[in-house]
Amino acid sequence: MQTQQNKLLKIVFAGVLAAMVYVVTLFRFPLLGSKVHFANAVCLLSGMLLGPVWGGLAAGLGSALYDAFGGGYDILNILITFVSKFAMAWVCGSLLAASFKNQQQAGPVRAVIACAAGALTYVALYMFKSLLMYGWAGMVSRFPASIINAAAAIVAAPIFYHALTPALRAAGILKHLQGGAD
């Protein structure tokens, strides 16, 4: 049974990570019909630190809030963004949590594999959305920037994760963030 302290820490960290996703999305640059940024790395980090559900909520909420307030998108695009970013963090968090059986932190190779699976999940969902909304030409034009974002996230998220976890473990916070079924 998860304690109230675990739930409170997850809520607080989910809020902080959602805010980080929002802010990092502000710092981007256009490339080949899309935009390159490090928000996907923070989405993956959310899944790695908080697990699939809470990490997915942080990633989805931060990205959806950006689309609503900073991106000027309609409600359908906002919902699609929420679902696709949630899925990215959920896949990453699920795979990483599966590797925690006898250790508190997954090794670097497992972290990279989990991040790659999460990032590629997002690319596939984004390409499907682009195909439906913009046709083949729109999808093809967005693919290079999507792969660059994915590659940057696959490199950056495990580095951030392995940089943060020793401090979170020493403070006694990591076990609360990664504990529990949700």
Image (spheres, rainbow, N blue to C red):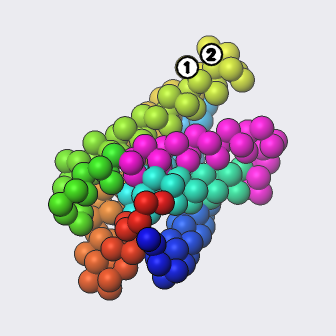
Q: Considering depth in this image, is 105 or 66 the residue closer to the camera?
A: 105
Say if residue 141 shows up in the picture. no
How many marks do you count on the picture? 2
Describe residue 144's horizontal placement relative to residue 115 as left or right. Answer: right
The percent coordinates of residue 14 (x first, y second) are 54, 67
Outermost residue, bottom side: 171
Describe residue 171's horizontal placement relative to residue 125 as left or right. Answer: left
In which quadrant is the N terminus drawn? bottom left
Residue neighbourhood size for the residue with mark 2, other residues' Cα within 10 Å, grouped as few (<14), some (14–19), many (≥20): few
Secondary structure at numbered mark 2: helix
* Residues at circles 1 and 2 in contact by the CB criterion of under 8 Å: yes
Q: Considering depth in this image, is 19 or 105 the residue closer to the camera?
A: 105
Type of residue at label 1?
Val
Describe residue 41's horizontal placement relative to residue 80 as left or right. Answer: left
Residue hosting label 2: 137
Magenta: main secondary structure equals helix
Q: Considering depth in this image, is 148 or 110 the residue closer to the camera?
A: 110
Is 89 colored magenta in this rendering? yes
Is 2 colored magenta in this rendering? no
Say if residue 72 shows up in the picture. yes
